[in-house]
Image (cartoon, rainbow, N blue to C red):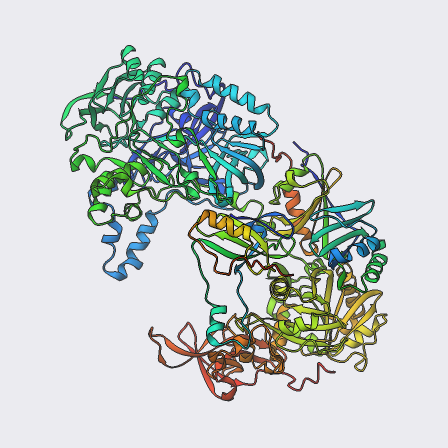
Amino acid sequence: MAEALADIARVTGLGMVTIRADLDHAGDAIAEAAGLAIPGQTRIVTDGSRSLGWMSPDELLLILPAAELADAIAALTDALASEHALVVDVSDARAVFDVTGPHADDVIAKLMPVDLDDLPPDGLRRSRAAQTAAALWRIPGGFRLIGFRSTADYLRLILENAAIPGSGLAPR
Amino acid sequence: MLILTCPYCGVKAEETELSPGGEAHLKRVGPGGTAEEFEAYLFARKNIKGVHFERWRHAYGCGKWFLAARDTHTMQVYGTYKAQTAHATDEIVANARQARAEWVPDWPQGSEAVVG
Amino acid sequence: MSRTPPFRLPRGGRLIDRAFQLAFRFDGRHLRGVQGDTLASALLANGQMLMGRSFKYHRPRGPLASGAEEPNALFGLGQGGRFEPNQRASTTALVAGMVLRSQNCWPSLDADVGAINNWLSPLLPAGFYYKTFIHPRPFWKHLFEPVIRRSAGLGRAPVGPDPDRYEQAYAFAETVVVGGGIAGLTAARDAADKGGRVIVLEQDPVWGGRTPTDHDGGPAAIDALLADLRGRGNVTLRRNCMATGLYDHGYLLAREALADHDPNQGIPRQRLWRIRAGHVITATGALERPLSFACNDVPGVMLASAVRDFISGYGVAPGRRIVAVTNNDDAYRTALTAQAAGLEVVAVIDARPQARGDLPQAARAANIPVMTGKAVAKVKGGTHVEGVAICDQAGDGRVTGSLDCDVVAMSGGWSPVVHLYSHCGGRLTWDEPEAMFRPDPSRPPLGADGKPMVTVLGAANGDLRCAGDLERSEAPTMPVWVMPQDAPYKLRAKMWLDFQNDVKVSDVELAAREGYASVEHAKRYTTLGMATDQGKNSNINGLAVLSKALNQPLEATGTTTFRPPYTPLTLGTIAAEARGEAFQPLRKTPMHDWHASHGASFEPVGHWRRPYSYPRAGEDRHGAVNREILAVRNGVGTLDASTLGKIVVKGPDAGRFLDMMYTNMMSTLPVGKCRYGLMCNENGFLMDDGVVARLSTDTWLCHTTTGGADRIHGHMEDWLQCEWWDWQVYTANLTEQYAQIAVAGPRARELLQRLPGTIDLSQDALPFMQWAEGALAGIPARIYRISFSGELSYEIAVPAGRGLELWERLHAEGRDLDITPYGTEAMHVMRAEKGFIMIGDETDGTVIPQDLGLHWAISKKKPDYIGKRAQARSFMKDGSRWQLVGLESLDGRVLPDGAYAVEPGVNANGQRKTQGRVTSSYHSPTLDRPIAMGLVRHGPARMGQVLEFPLPSGEVMKARIVDPVFYDKEGTRLNG
């Protein structure tokens, strides 16, 4: 009863790069520069500390340790130099939270109109959390949720509110 | 509250994840257009009870604009398709015709043009 | 006859646990109930039959029903912020320590002054308000309306904010079954067999619906189904969960009670489920209808089903001597139940000529007197039932006898609960043999796939004997809409249809006579079905009376529209987490906390909070604004401009694209330079503005207004995706990636040059409207030499995560320069001093750039841009549009923002003609006088003329038309 439904932890120290390009055409170059395979539609590919998420048919999001950011941007910019493409640093534009624990599903189900049964292990779902945009994917023990930096306090507030002890969604 | 499947990312999105954009397949009239043409482009809308083609943006998702064929009376969705499409697909037309036998597309048939 | 204790029966009560006593208070009295009681059963167990006063006539009322349809027994519940009016006694579980207050009575439930309306009732028929208070006209506003308002409304509003928590949750299932009775549970099992997720919702705390009460094998059958369902991984059973509304594409709202009226649990009180169902099965049962006989509202007249619910469910005797009156077999169950509980059943009065079904026969076998072809002529008694006068149903009410009793159990047949089915467009059909509206299988609501979205099962579908395989056969119902059938007016004027709103048979007949033939009109004229119960008891009876009065079949009359919610929803569940701090996403810049700790007074701009000004001790908001402006004009100030939209646009076609987006030419902007741009919509109206910087040959950065960032990004993507999808352009909204700080004032350069950096900030290296990139104070920065204040100004963009660091560094370095943080209001005043327009002040969605004298920012060379064709429309070009000017108040006072300039004459509505309005108006501390901007017909050609601005007080202010640039017309300062 006294236990929150899930741990809510802000994650910092991540670098993020938005890549816009024709993925059919430039996919190989991006994969090589990013060090990850191109994810399928609405999927995210993770390999150790790096992830590459499918954001839209012509947009990917590379997530990696902040220390590797500058090199990655340089590598991607280089690799796409001859393409029509956009590579931009969006690391500072985001707020990232990990929602973990046995009832992490319940916390997400209170905020996002997303059918979690339909979210594959490597699924990336862009939607909203209450009234603000958010993207979601699975991590061991729960979910990682990213939203906009300016709404970080709001996100923490609604996540913690959704996780209050005793408010699990199991039928009573 | 509607559910529409975004043709770009395959997500079954609910209405709160989308933003509406009004009637689809309007042809832009620029500086060369006559007053009548421009008025029709800017203001004249079909406002149909029945088979309706409309624009939606998957605003809380992949951000892409897409088109939906929906029945404004029964709420049946005949299909969604990409914005870079001149007309609804044959499959959508067939779906609409099945539900509303009296409806006929107002564009030339057998010339489904998908561009881009 | 008097009512005698004990009211709690010695045995029975399927739903209660007598071992747990619960104390509560009712109108100050200390009473006790038991675990499992509802408020209604607990009050009845204390002998309290009088539970409310009716809305209009203040007639004494007892409970009518035992479920969600209860119209009478409504209480104010709780205290302070937790007080809630109109809580249904029949569905509210008793919680220890509850405080109940009766409603709509003064000074007390027993002695209610408002009951005088009852004696005046012949003067207060339907439509009374409309007819009586219409003349003389002025009386309405000053006399009638205030008096009527005082007596209007049922229950009091709570005082103080609700301290309880509420939440929402999303759920998805292939099948959702609404109703946990025999039909619903059976359907859930069948659906679960087919696979897919199944959610079952039951409004009550217990499963089974009527089956356990009405059928001998009922409890076992329900238990078996529940055991089966609980063993399945794909079934979720949710009780205390009321499906309140069904909407398009299988969207179902349901309210789950978690800790209702029990704040001690510390968990959310209620949860609103937002369920998306592949298919919905409604097995919502049926509601019993009252019978319309004279004085059918006296406390003690109850639905037959309610009488047996109280006996068998709660072990409570509503009375000792019971008369049942019916037009169907089902009411005999009540007679048999009551007799088995040791109560006296005086008689069953059956309106049908004969009653030969299994149940009547069983009643006769149990020595219960059965009187067929009979009716209740009138109920005797005032605050409780004392007896009934009997007459022939086929007659005009001549009394043939009378019976003493303290409870009348009535049954007028059953109406399927078709609400959810109807909410989303399902149509009904009139079932003549069963005398009820039920779902028309040929016209169900359709889902996104065009297939029926709802299946209705069991009693909700008109199958009133769906549990019949457990029981005996039943004979048909005989429609009885008025009892007796030829009752005279005197009786009809005492027959209640809508108990909560006090609508009688005679009122509906009056509406029909006065021409309200449409059921929707008659409803509103009489208020039938418009109370908090939404006509659950009265709907069909009222339609039948209306149909008879109009001499048309019932199906020709039709029903009124069923609208959600099925039962009232607490506003808290609709708001859920969106209250207090989380009411809206409050967007904060990287420097937000610094502003807060330095006394910022914030203002909302979209979802952002921006410092309006930074008042110091002893200073008000406006005092601070004046100080901040002078500091910037004379020294240096900093503005947090992080909220400005920043959209990067890149690609081989980016220049061509921006030429379409903006009214001026962006493709020719040299790399390294900035240009102010205007963006219009296809209607030609100005929608946003901002400075565009060319970052490289194929990349531009577009600044938008604070509120415009997402909208303009969406606008750009719209045109790129839907119109020019073959153009090679990518955009990205980088608004949140950067903190942006405006450093403005004559000493801005001096300050910035104190910071270590790689960027040459000199006038030669970085003149006005250029940008440069490098490091500043060790932070990667892009510096734009742009100015909204009219001063020497640099806007510095750094990664958001380092914004605070730079801000603090600037303030540390600038202390001796008296560096001053300034807010949005200082920015607004300074831009107005300079005659710069502000989107949302000078524009309102009907203003074109030409109105604002911005011709210099509209390219004449470009063949096209968004809005160009519209700006060529005839009335956009005619000279009579209101145009931007400065306004100088003649008496030294600040003109009211939005004030209109009048001209001689009146328009077609008799209003003064207008020729302009004030769009921005401030006191300028720089000039120490008021300044204003406005839009005036032929304004720029009328310099020096004086306009009149009438104020709401009747006073008229005068202002002279002047140039809108009040300060530094030559622009020497910003070029400094």
The image shows residue C926 at horizontal and vertical percentages of: 63, 79
In-image side of C191 versus C488 (left or right): right
| Quadrant (top left, top right, bottom left, bottom right) of the C terminus of chain C | bottom right
Front position in the image: C59 or A151? A151
Residue C137 in sight from this viewpoint: yes
The image shows residue C224 at horizontal and vertical percentages of: 52, 19
Front position in the image: C91 or A81? A81
Front position in the image: C100 or C797? C797
Which image quadrant is residue C615 in? bottom right
The correct choice, above or below, for B67 with respect to C566 in the image is below
The correct choice, above or below, for C257 with respect to C425 in the image is above
In-image side of C55 versus C714 (left or right): left
In-image side of A31 versus C664 (left or right): right
Residue C273 in sight from this viewpoint: no
Front position in the image: C170 or C589? C170
The image shows residue B26 at horizontal and vertical percentages of: 53, 64
The image shows residue C865 at horizontal and vertical percentages of: 60, 74
The correct choice, above or below, for C380 with respect to A61 in the image is above
Number of marks drawn: 0
Looking at the image, which residue is at 59% across and 82% down? Answer: C855
Which image quadrant is residue C114 in? top left
Which image quadrant is residue C498 in? top left
| Quadrant (top left, top right, bottom left, bottom right) of the N terminus of chain C | top left
The correct choice, above or below, for C936 with respect to C333 in the image is below
